[in-house]
Image (tube, rainbow, N blue to C red):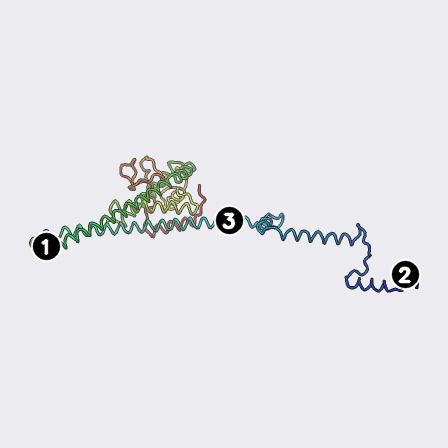
Amino acid sequence: MSDEYVDDGSDDISNSLAAECTGTVGMPDDAAADGPLYESMASAVEAYDEHEALKDREPEELVEEDEQPRKGSGKVPLGALREERAKRQQLQQQLDAQAQQLAIYQQQLAQFQQYQQQLAQTQQQQAQLEPEIDPEIDPVGFIRAKEKQFTEQLQNVQYQQQYQQAVVQLQQEQQQLAPVVAQAEEAFAESVGVENYRAAFEAVHQTIQANMRQQHPNASPQEMALIEQTVNVAFVRRCQAEGINPAEHIYNRAIEMGLVSAVPGQRVPGTRLPPKAPTSLSTLSANGRAPDQRGAYKAGDIANLSNDEFNRLFESMRDTQRPAV
């Protein structure tokens, strides 16, 4: 039997069957390097390599790549959105902290007022007391009277300590705010004229002081000073949070109230210029008075408003929405 190969057509059948199974019908068996089959296979291999490379990368790297701005896409980068969200969260935290601090001041003020009332009642009761009890005649009554007197004195000491703590905290707040307010006030006063700003400040200040005296005729000087300092700190802090220049807001308030003219240098009929004494929001005295005005109230008094007036003042600040200096 001869070993010579005889083509009986079985190879063609096998090749055809293999092409059908592999989906390569019509493709040549030997693809050239510059042919379409080679280029297609090369592209598939390159895409697979890129896929494997992305699988090995960290998720943070992919996020940073997505955050790159895309030209012509009109979309805001993810990084910018995150930065804006962080700023808003930081601002909200500052507002919450300031609100908590203001609540502490108000609580301490209420405690001090309660102490003042109890002290006045105690003094009045002591003035009406009968002569001191003789311990030899009524030893039990003498002991009870001494215990009551000791308890009242202890309560007075506690209220005094709370008041002193409130004053110290207010002084610290005022020291922190003074440089910021002075800078903002100086810049705004130069834009409208120092004399014009001083006239507007004094006009608003005098009006608010008159209203405070009318609403709180029985308030002691200590109570008035603590109220003025507390509200002043809250006023400046709120202006900072709202992005408002406190000096500009005071000046606009004077114009709205008709106390000064909207035209710099022009006086409103029926008004008089205040005495030429330095006036500044940043000058905050510990007792609510300025040392250079011989007992006249100073810049911190601009926030001496009742609760209703104080709320209306902040509502008008929200409507103004002026940028800080």
Which quadrant would the N terminus be assigned to in this image?
Answer: bottom right
Q: Earlier in the sequence, mark 1 or mark 3?
A: 3
Dots 1 and 3: beta carbons under 8 Å?
no
Residue, disc 2: 5
Q: Nearer the viewer, residue 186 or 121?
A: 121
Q: Position of residue 217 (x, y in %)?
A: 25, 49
Instruction: Give the number of the disc on residue 139.
Output: 1
Image check: 269 left or right of 161? right
What amino acid is labelled 1 in the image? Pro
Tag 2's secondary structure? loop
Q: Quick one: label 1, few (<14), some, or many (20+) residues within 10 Å?
A: few
Tag 3's secondary structure? helix
Q: CA distance from mark 1 to mark 2?
A: 142 Å
Which mark is in front, 1 or 2? Answer: 2
What amino acid is labelled 3 in the image? Glu
Q: Note whether 119 is above or below 2 in the view shown.
A: above
Which mark is in front, 1 or 3? Answer: 1
Q: Note whether 191 is above or below 52 in the view shown.
A: above
Image check: 258 left or right of 50? left
